Amino acid sequence: RDVTPGAGKQCVMAGDEKGPRFDQVEAITFSFDGSQMGYLAREGNRWFAMIGGRKGPAFEQVRYLTFSRDGRRHAYVAKRNKKEFVVADDQIGPEFDLVFFPHFRCDGKWEYQAERDGRRFELVEGQAPAACPGYPCGTYFGADCTKSAEVKYRGGKKVIVFADKAGPEFESLSFFRFSPDGSKVAYGVSMDH
């Protein structure tokens, strides 16, 4: 599937099918099972998510489009009036100063971290927000839901625990990803020296 520019516009090609034209398209995303495709699009200064050929509401910014493993649910971060929030299945969530990487857990619930007034929280669908010492926090699962990695905090430093083995301590972790088969994990770090 390609992003095809034309006459100053862009569209998404899905096989031989050409999607609607926009000023800009980016972040083409598939669900884990391949049943759903979506992307982010801009018309003028307004951004929105295109999910299964349907245009969502317009915002100042949208990012981090993600699907549940079965492709039935979607979520993304949107921005309005300098506040960020998660839009999950077309429902707008609470406003924060910053929202970090929403995703769907193996049980199908959405989860994300957010910051408001200098305090960080972990939000899980159906649960009260929990204090989060930093980003990222919590437990993440690989694509097959059998392997997990957990972010732990030790004396202000972060450690990834994967396959029951703790890695080295770092000042900061910026992201991490599982290999497609779930056997490995890679992550970005900030080092103090």
Image (cartoon, rainbow, N blue to C red):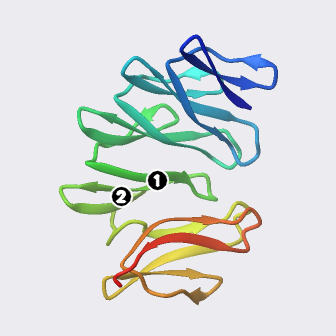
Percent from the top left, x then y, of residue 61?
38, 33
SS state under label 2:
loop
Q: Residue at x 58, y 57 (%)?
A: 105
Q: Nearer the viewer, residue 105 or 176?
A: 176
> Which amino acid, mark 1?
Phe
- Cα separation, mark 1 vs mark 2, equals 18 Å
Q: Residue at x 47, y 70 (%)?
A: 138
Instruction: Say whether residue 127 is visible.
Output: yes
Percent from the top left, x then y, of residue 90?
48, 31
Percent from the top left, x then y, of residue 40?
53, 31
Q: Please, which residue is most extreme toward the top here?
A: 7
Residue, disc 1: 101
> Which amino acid, mark 2?
Ala
Tag of residue 128: 2
Q: Nearer the viewer, residue 5 or 106?
A: 5
Report the label total: 2
Label 2 crowd bin: few (<14), some (14–19), many (20+), radius 10 Å? few
Q: Is residue 92 left or right of residue 41?
A: left
Q: Residue at x 54, y 86 (%)?
A: 167
If the image is split into quadrants, where does the N terminus sit? Answer: top right
